[in-house]
Image: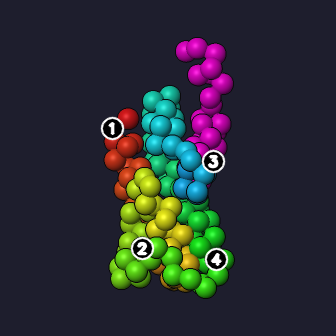
Amino acid sequence: MDTFSQFLTSDISLWGLFISSLLGATLLPGGSEAVLFGVLKLHPELFWPALLVGTLGNTIGGMISFGMGWLLPQTQQLKHVEKVRQHGTPALLFAWAPLIGDALCLAAGWLRLNPWHAALFMLLGKFLRYLVIALTA
């Protein structure tokens, strides 16, 4: 094992995954999928902890975007919000999707959808996405 790999202990790897998944789910760019894949290649014994930590961080990041949407004034209609209103919180099953995921979370917050339901659907979608990635690692 090289020096860099030795430095990436299981604790540091999980913290890095949490931060990466949290930031990747906000409006900031990031790719936590690669971090999850790397953590599982270095520490295959962390399958379930990594899956749970990544899901938790990504869901919290999505809820940050949701909260940002909640804080936006409702003075004008946002583009494509009607689709989210039509489908409600189940639309957040796709909060993991590139390009549209952040917009879904922001729109759901702007619409003042139930935050508990929003978090649940985000968590389910993000968990399933990470599970698929983890199973391929």
Mark sitting earlier along the chain (4/1): 4
CA distance separating discs 4 and 1: 39 Å
Q: Residues within 10 Å of mark 2 (few under 14, many from 20)?
A: few
Q: Nearer the viewer, mark 3 or mark 2?
A: 2
What residue sits right under mark 3 in the picture?
19
The foreground one among 123 and 44 is 123
What residue sits right under mark 1 in the picture?
136
Decide: is 56 above or below 7. below
Hey, which residue is sitting farthest top in the picture? 2
Q: Residue at x 47, y 37 (%)?
A: 34
Q: Nearer the viewer, mark 2 or mark 1?
A: 2
Secondary-structure class at tag 2: loop
Q: Is residue 121 magenta?
A: no
Q: Is residue 16 magenta?
A: yes
Mark sitting earlier along the chain (3/1): 3
Highlighted range, magenta = 1-22
The foreground one among 121 and 48 is 121
CA distance separating discs 3 and 2: 30 Å
The foreground one among 109 and 124 is 109
What residue sits right under mark 2 in the picture?
80
Secondary-structure class at tag 1: helix
Q: Residue at x 33, y 38 (%)?
A: 136
Q: Pinpoint residue 116: horizontal percent, then vertical percent.
A: 52, 78
**Is disc 2 in contact with disc 1, using a CB cutoff of under 8 Å?**
no
Chief SS of the magenta region: helix
